[in-house]
Image (cartoon, helix red, strand yellow):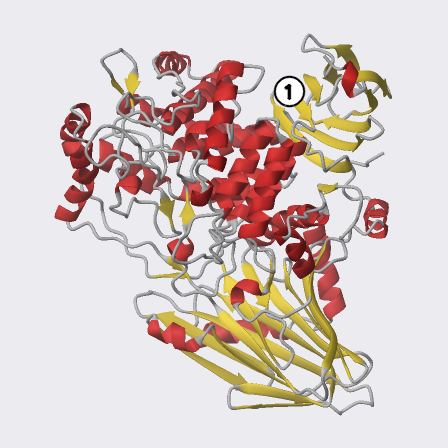
Amino acid sequence: MISTDHEDPTKREQERRRGRDHLLVMAKPAVRWQDALPSGNGALGAMMYGSIAEDTILINHEALWYGGTTKEPPDLSVHLPQLRELLGSGKYAEANRFFPDKMREANYKAATSKYQPGFDLKLFTETAGAFRAYRRSLDMETGELSVRWTENGVRMERRAFVSRPDDMVVLRIAAGETLSPRTALQLTVHDPAEAESHGFAFGSDAAGDYLTAWGKHADAAGSFCAVARIVASSGYAGPGQAVAAAENGRIDVRGAGPIVVLLKVSAVSGEADERERLKRELAGIAADYETLLGRHAAEHRDLFMRAGLDLGDGEGRGETNERLLLDAYEGEIGTALPERMYDYGRYLLVASSRPGGLPANLQGIWNGDYQPAWSGAFFMNENIQMNYWQALTGNMPEAARPLYDFVDSLLPDMRLNARSFYGCRGILSPLFASPESGRKKNVQPHVVYWTAGAGWLAQHYYDYWLYTGDERFLETRAIPFMKEVAAFYEDFLIEGPDGRWLFSPSNSPENYANGRFEGAGTLSVCVNATMDAAVAKELLGNLCRVCEERGLEPDSVARWRRLLEKLPDYETNADGAMKEWLHPDFEDNYHHRHLSHLYPLFPGFEITGETNPELFEACRIAVEKRLVVGLGQQTGWSLAHMANLYARLGDGDRALECLELLARSCLGDNLFTYHNDWRRQGVTLNARRAPFQIDANFGWTAAMQEMLLFSAPGRIKLLPALPGKWERGAFRNFRCRGGVAVSLRWDMREGIAELTMEADRSQTVDVHFHRAIETIEHDGGARIADSSRGRHCRTAELTAGRKTTWTVRFAPYRNEP
C-alpha cells in the first residue's frame, strides 16, 4: 500500500531501491547556457555548464530586470462608443486599428522590463590527463548539481546547489582523497561584451578570499552585485599546504584539498557598502558543504517529495537524457522519460517559485540573454497560468502563493486599465506584465483588446480555496478579487439585438478568425470570443455560489445572477466542433496553437462527459482539428495544453501522443522545453528562432496529473485518461478540490487497484474509476455506497482527518457495460 505520509524516510529508501532516485543524468557538458543544468531556491538561480577545463556557473536572480518604462495610459474610454459602432457595422479592419492608433496619437510609448542575466562564476582548472567516465547530473530530490569525471585514475568532482535557508550558491571542488587540481576562479557580470552592448556598466575585483562583481544599467535607478568567498582547505599532505592568491581579477588556488565557494547576490544595490555587507555575511558562515547541503535539502525535499508517481517497470531510469531523447526521436518512448519529465516539472517549480518572491516567469528564474524572448515577462493569456496548473494537485500550495502576491501587487494598475480603456470599474489585466507595472503597454491589437485575463486569474484564486480550504484566503483575497472582476463585467457588457450580452471588443488569444470581411484571417479584434463568455460564466458562477453559501452580498448576487442569465450560449460549427467565436461573422481557424475557446473543458470543468455530452464531443472534435489540421502551427506549450485537454476528454493515448510529440520536437538535452522546434522538422511552428520557454515543462507535469486524477467539488475520477502503455503504476499524495489527499497503486494486468484517501474536511464524494468495479474491500475508514452513476462509481462519506484504504478489483473488460 502507498503511504500518504510524505515525511516517511522508509518510503524514500524504497523508491531509491526501485531505481526511483529522481536523478537527471547527462553524458556531455553544455556549450550554451540553455543546455546547462539548473538549481534554484525560488529567487536565486544557478546553471552549471559542466566543462572540465573552463566551466561556467551562470547566476540569476528573480528581481534583476532592466529597461522598463511606464506612462499614464490615455483615456480611450471616450472613444469606446465609436469603436463599438465600427464593430457593430462589421468594419473590423478599421476597428482593429482604432484603439492602437489612438494610443499612438497620444504618444503612448511604454516598454516592459526585460529579465536580465546576473553573473558568471568562471572556473579555470588545470588538467593532468585525458578525462574518462564523464557525467553531469541533477539530483531533483535535493537540488544538487554535480559534474564528475576520472583523470589519471582519480575521481574528480564539482558539486553545487542554491541554498533555500542560507540564500546563496554553494560550490565544492574536490579530487577524491588527493589535492584538488590547480583552479583559478573569476566572477564577472554574465557575458561582459553583451552586457556592455545593452547599456550596462560593470566592474569586478578579487582581493583576499573574495571575488566581487557589480553592474548597473544606464537607465536603471539602482545597481546590483555579487560576492563570492573562496575557502581553500589545507591539502591532505598536512596543514599549511593551500595557497590562494588574488591577482588580475582572479583567485588562483593550488595545493589545496576540497575548495568551497559561497556566493551571495544583492538585487537592490551594487554599491561598495552593499558589497561589504555581503562579505560580512559570508564571513560568518561556516564553509562546511555537507552541513549546508543537509540544511537546504531538508527544506527542498519536503516540497519536492510531497507527491510523486511511479510508472512501474523502471526500464531506462538509469539512462542519460541523451539516450532517452534518442529513443524518443525513434518514436520509442517508454515510461522513464515521462517519469523524469514529471519530476523535472515539479523540481523546476520548487526551484523558481517561493513565498515572498516573484512567480516563475517565462524562463522560471534561469536566463542568459539580455534580450530574452518576450522579455522573459509574465504572460497572462496562457503562460503564467500553465506555470501553476500543477501546483495544487501536486500538493505544493506554497509554490503557488507568489502568483497571488504578484497579481495583487498589480491591482492599482489593473484598475487604471479598466478605467482608461473602457471606463469601467473593477480590474482589467494586462496581457503581460513585469514587476514594475501591470499597465497595458503594447499597441498590438491582440494585446489591446484582450479582456479575459483577470477572470482567468480568478480561477486560480478560487481553486486555491477549493484545494486548501483556507477560509482567510477566501475572505480576504479570493472573494475581493472576484468581486473586482465582476464589477468590470457589470460595466463592460452591452446588450445585443437578441437580448444577450455582447463582449465588444473581444479577442480570442492570438488567433485570427476567418470570415467574409475585410482582413479575415489577420485581425485580432472581434465580438463574442467564446473564451470571454466562458471565463465570465465561470467567474460569476463561482462568485454567486460562494457568496450564497456564506450569506454574503445578497444584492450583488442577484445582479450577478442576472448577468449570468444573459451570457451567450456555446455553439458548434459545421464540423461539429466547438466554435471559437459566438458571432455569425467569425468562422473557425484551425491553423493555430491557442485553444482558448475550450476553456470550459480545461482548465475549467464546466463541460464534462456527464454534464454535457454534446458539447464534450464538440470539444473533442475541436482539439482533433488542431492536432491534425494545425499540427504545423503548434508549439511546445500548446502541445502540453493539448495533452491536458485530451486528459479531460478521457483519451490517455492521445494525451500521451501530444507529450511524445513535444519530446521529439521541443526538448533540449537538459530537458528544458522550447517554444518550438529549432530543427524545423515540421511538427511545430516554423519560427525564426526557438527560445527556451519553461511553461511546457510545467504543463507536461500538469498533464500527467490530469491523466491520473480529476477532481471537482464532490467528484474524484481515478485514472480518467490512463494510456495503454501505463498498465502498472502508482501516484501518491495528489490533492483534490475539496481537500482530499489521494494515493493510488494500479495493475491493469491483474485488474486491481489500491486506494488511500484522507480528507481535510468531512464530505461526501463520488469516486469514479475508469473501469467497472467488481468488488471493494475497505478498512471501514469511510462509509461506501453504490452510486447512481453506475458500476464505475461509488459514493463515499469521508470524515475529516480519517484515512480510508480500499482494495478494488475491476470487472474484466468484456463484462463492462
**Residue at 82 percent of width and 16 percent of height:** 774
Relative height, residue 111 to residue 185 (above, below):
above
Where residue 176 sits in the image (x, y, percent)? 80, 78
Q: Sort mark 1 into few (<14), some (14-19) or many (20+) by Cα contacts within 10 Å.
A: some
The residue to which callout 1 is attached is: 715
In the rendered image of this protein, does residue 696 appear above or below residue 186? above
Q: Residue at x 39, y 73 (%)?
A: 194
Residue 702 seen in the current view? no
Establish if 226 lies above or below 114. Answer: below
Placement of 332 over or under 562, stated as above or below: below
Q: Is residue 367 left or right of residue 85?
A: right
Q: In the displayed structure, does residue 521 sit left or right of residue 693?
A: left
Which residue is most to the top?
A: 788
Amino acid type at image mark 1: Arg
Camera-nearest residue between 550 and 794: 794
**Which residue is found at the position 56% from the left and 55% from the top?**
672
Q: Quadrant of residue 814?
A: top right
- The residue tagged with tag 1: helix, strand or loop? strand
In which quarter of the view is residue 480 placed? top left
